[in-house]
Amino acid sequence: MDNRKKNAGLPIGDRLEHWQSRPIPQRKVMPGHYCSVEPLQPEAHAEQLYQAFAEDTQEVNWTYLPYGPFKSFESFNQWLSDSCSTDDPLFFVIIDKRTSVAVGLVSFLRIDAAVGVIEVGHIHFSPRLQQTRLATEAMYLMMRRVFDDLGYRRYEWKCDACNEGSKKAALRLGFRFEGVFRQATIYKQRNRDTAWFSVIDKEWPAIRAGLEDWLDPTNFDHHGQQRKGLQECY
């Protein structure tokens, strides 16, 4: 008996007879060529992050985050210790392998292992990290962990619909725009319409190949300039 007969002729989604709940992400290092994505340890990383974020003298990078800016190291360190030691969100730092210094913060969150869905969020790239190979590689390493190591089906990126930079970054990395959830939440006493993006497992092999092609050291000249853009690699 086929599915249409069993379901009164109504269309249904693909059967996933062999699907099993996926593992929960662990606090494990994700090593790369240019950077390393490592579990956050406030005692080791708080000062490094605070100094890196302080280079954003106009505090622009805090605009679309639901917290910050912090006016002192003590308040930042307290927030990092109190709010970033959970399993969901699960926070990591991005380490520049040239300096061994933390230059960014990121997390896995809204982890639903039963259905294989996970989100990347709390992305905060310091000026040292923005628009660099390290930033792209960090996102690649996290996607590789989600799809190749853990076997998830869907990887989500969500941001304030006003955040043009975040939306462009998602598209550049191969995420597909899915729409805007109007008046989805409130933060910093203002409305947030939330833009949704995703990558699903069947799209990942082509995206992975493109990212690996772009990240290859031979794609950069001796000045560090790319020979071809990421969109040319997909």
Image (cartoon, rainbow, N blue to C red):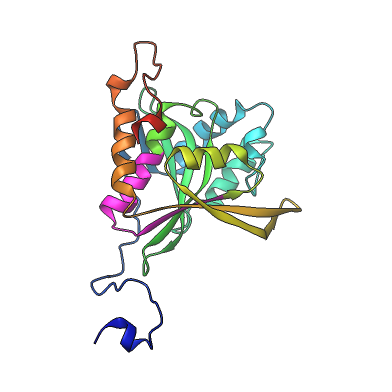
Q: In this picture, is 100 found above or below 167? A: above
Regarding residue 40, the answer to whether it shows in the image is no
Q: Residue furthest top?
A: 222
Percent across and percent down for residue 174 are 42, 43
Instruction: Please name whichever residue, 138 or 85, is drawn nearer the observer in this view of the structure.
Output: 138
Residue visible at 30% across and 43% down in the picture: 206
Q: In this picture, is 188 found above or below 52? A: below
Residue visible at 26% across and 52% down in the picture: 149
Q: Is residue 39 left or right of residue 82?
A: left
Instruction: Please name whichever residue, 138 or 84, is drawn nearer the observer in this view of the structure.
Output: 138
Residue visible at 36% across and 40% down in the picture: 140
Percent across and percent down for residue 136 are 41, 34
Regarding residue 134, the answer to whether it shows in the image is yes
- For residue 30, which quarter of the picture? top left
Instruction: Please name whichever residue, 40 or 13, is drawn nearer the observer in this view of the structure.
Output: 13
Percent across and percent down for residue 35 are 36, 31
- For residue 208, which quarter of the picture? top left
- Tally of numbered tags: 0
Stretch of the chain drawn in magenta? 139-158
Residue visible at 56% across and 33% down in the picture: 50
- For residue 20, which quarter of the picture? bottom left
